[in-house]
Image (tube, grey):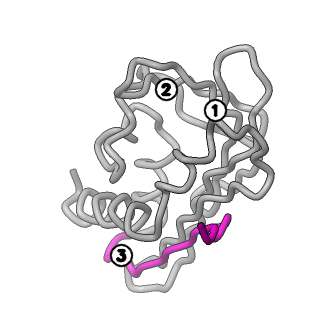
Amino acid sequence: MTDVPRVVRVSREVAADPETIFELIADPAQQPRWDGNDNLGNADVGQRVRGVGDVFVMTLTSGQVRENRVVEFDESRLIAWQPAPPGEEPPGHLWRWALEPLGDGRTRVIHSYDWTALTDEKRMARARQNTPDALAASVDRLAALAESGA
């Protein structure tokens, strides 16, 4: 079987300012609203990410809990995290959102999933499911929320 790319990236222009979009990403309680993989169940309110080193907890639709360690952060521009089961080291995958202001209330949203460092064979099949279409579904849902002001 030919392996799929280990870095998946999609982008799209959104008719909303970076601050509005970033709030939907940096507040974990909002993430299930735009998750195109339908993988995110819920996150407690009050975990809004403020910087590198923050950890937010998410319950998946499967009931599993993930601690997400923020490893990149620039308010309203960039956020990236590595998920891991509670108390464990991240197994080697990274979710990243980058926002580029385009002016006139428009923003380029770039979403990527990087599993180049993933070595756990049990997680490979799930990692392969994070295709460009799956990432685009999240970006599209995020755009719809941001553009509607919801």
In which image quadrant can residue 50 be found?
A: top right
Q: Amino acid at mark 1?
A: Asn
* Residue drawn 49% across the image and 57% down it: 130
- Number of the label disc, if any, that sits on residue 14: 3
Up-down relation of residue 35 to residue 84 (above or below): below
* Residue bearing the label numbered 2: 58
Q: Amino acid at mark 2?
A: Met
Up-down relation of residue 133 to residue 122 (above or below): below
Where's residue 108, x and y in %? 48, 78
What is the crowding at mark 2: few (fewer than 14 residues within 10 Å), some, or many (at least 20)? Answer: many
Q: Nearer the viewer, residue 22 or 93?
A: 93
| Comes first in the chain, label 3 or label 2 | 3
Q: Nearer the observer, disc 3 or disc 1?
A: 1
Where's residue 75, x and y in %? 64, 54
- Number of the label disc, if any, that sits on residue 17: none
| Comes first in the chain, label 3 or label 1 | 3
In which image quadrant can residue 136 be found?
A: bottom left
Instruction: Provide the residue span drawn in magenta.
Output: 1-16
Q: Nearer the viewer, residue 67 or 63?
A: 63
| Comes first in the chain, label 2 or label 1 | 2
**CB within 8 Å, label 2 to label 1:** yes
The residues tagged by marks 3 and 2 sit, at their Cα atoms, a distance apart of: 26 Å
The residues tagged by marks 2 and 1 sit, at their Cα atoms, a distance apart of: 8 Å
Where's residue 100, x and y in %? 57, 76
Secondary structure under tag 1 reads: strand
Secondary structure under tag 3 reads: strand
What is the crowding at mark 1: few (fewer than 14 residues within 10 Å), some, or many (at least 20)? Answer: many
Q: Amino acid at mark 3?
A: Val
* Residue bearing the label numbered 1: 68
The residues tagged by marks 3 and 1 sit, at their Cα atoms, a distance apart of: 26 Å
Up-down relation of residue 50 to residue 102 (above or below): above
